[in-house]
Image (cartoon, rainbow, N blue to C red):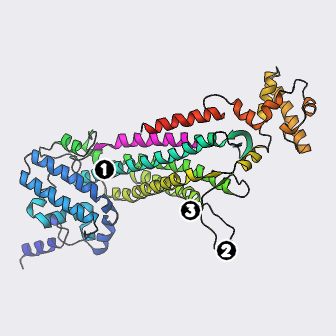
Amino acid sequence: MSNKDTTAHSASKTNSQWGGRFSEPTDAFVQRFTASVMFDQRLAKQDIQGSIAHATMLETAGVLTAEERDAIINALSDIAADIANGHFAWSVALEDVHMNIESELTKRIGLTGKKLHTGRSRNDQVATDIRLYLRDEIDVIATELTRLQQGIVGLAEREAATIMPGFTHLQTAQPVTFGHHLMAWFEMLTRDYTRLLDCRKRMNQSPLGAAALAGTTYPINRELTSELLGFAHPTRNSLDSVSDRDFGIEFCSFAAILLTHMSRMSEELILWTSAQFNFIDLPDRFCTGSSIMPQKKNPDVPELVRGKTGRVNGHLVSLLTLMKSQPLAYNKDNQEDKEPLFDTVDTVRDCLRAFADMIPAITPKKDNMRKAAMQGFATATDMADYLVRQGIAFRDAHEIVGKSVAYGIAHNKDLSEMTLQELQQFSPNIEHGIFDVLTLEGSVAARNHIGGTAPEHVILAAQKAKADLLTR
């Protein structure tokens, strides 16, 4: 065998998509170590979408004939169907989703399949695929987030007048309504929703046509492929197009903030279902039991959401660390962006689905909530405000109420349970009207302004929220 024949024989053992420069095949372990097809095959749908748009554009640029374009598009559509039906054989030897699909395309239509990659690189191809994938998933996540908020609003409206203690430092502070507390959750999630939309808007740009890093010499039409793929416009710099993953980092940042909010919600749900609080009941279908303690009903769903927050936070740090030292343009490091991003997407979607199903099914234990609000002198601030209206300076009123509370602790009496004579020993300015503000109902009703806990404003807030959700 001649030297020429030996070189050709060795090169044939390498990856046929890029092996021309190589004289020996890739080590079997290195092949597995560097392959990404095990996880990036979930980009197959988007990869085929991008290839169809690219083929359509190449025909208008005169690179492909109409017959070649149609052959490529038809074969890619068939491959997409095979993948969807589980009839596609993925190969680690072909490294990634892109080469697996291109190799199969060439098997099916021959030389024409090899023309598809004209004017593009795997660098702009994967950048396009990830943006298409993430855009699709953002739309699903936005729908689930809206569904969760709808459930919260519905429950808040029903429980607009249900009194419970409000806490600071996990100590009883002032009475609020359960509906008001739920609407606080709604506001947190609304900000998360707007962050998600902002992320989608910034990432909705097409990198296709940036090629490896510098663009291409072929007469491509990036505006056309951008339009065909539903992007707002093409990216404006080829180096940046293929090398940055800030859109993925931004999504993971959104996810970390969302899961932080959901973790806080979870913590409250876990506390409220405990025997010590006993404020709410979760349906059995969202809980589990104990293998040893038959009385247990564990709030596993909120506990898992609380736990998964650490997982998502870790993915954000992972992507930030991945990108922090990379010079322009593309580096193999970026293969490591997908698993954290994919897992973040899956985790966020599942957590939202679980909460959207569970929250509307919560049953509040109103008597227990009210009884808890009666403890801890929750209307002390209302008494201080009453004294101010009676002409007493706030700091003096604060001291009077503090002494009244000390008296209540010593005699095991709430402020509302004291007689007028008992209260007047602390200030002669106290009159019978004080009892209008010392009741729980009087306390919450007095917060009668936008953002306050008065039931009528909770109902107005819920109604406005429902109207806003309908416009999404």
Left or right relative to 253: residue 293: right
Identify the residue under disc 1: 132
Q: Which mark is residue 292?
A: 2
Q: Amino acid at mark 1?
A: Leu
Residue drawn at x 51%, y 56% is: 354
Q: Nearer the viewer, mark 1 or mark 2?
A: 2
Give the Cα separation between the discs numbered 2 and 3: 19 Å
Between marks 1 and 3 in the image, the one whose residue lies nearer the viewer: 3
Counting residues from the N terminus, which is met first, the one under dot 1 or under dot 2?
1
Q: Position of residue 326 (x, y in %)?
A: 36, 51
Number of marks in the rendered image: 3
Mark 1: which secondary structure?
Answer: helix
Compare marks 1 and 3 and give the one earlier in the sequence: 1
Identified at 11% across, 53% down, the residue is 69
Q: Amino acid at mark 2?
A: Ile
Identify which residue, 456 or 381, lies in the foreground. Answer: 456
* Contact between labelled residues 2 and 1, with CB atoms less than 8 Å apart: no
Which residue is nearer to you in this view: 36 or 27? Answer: 36
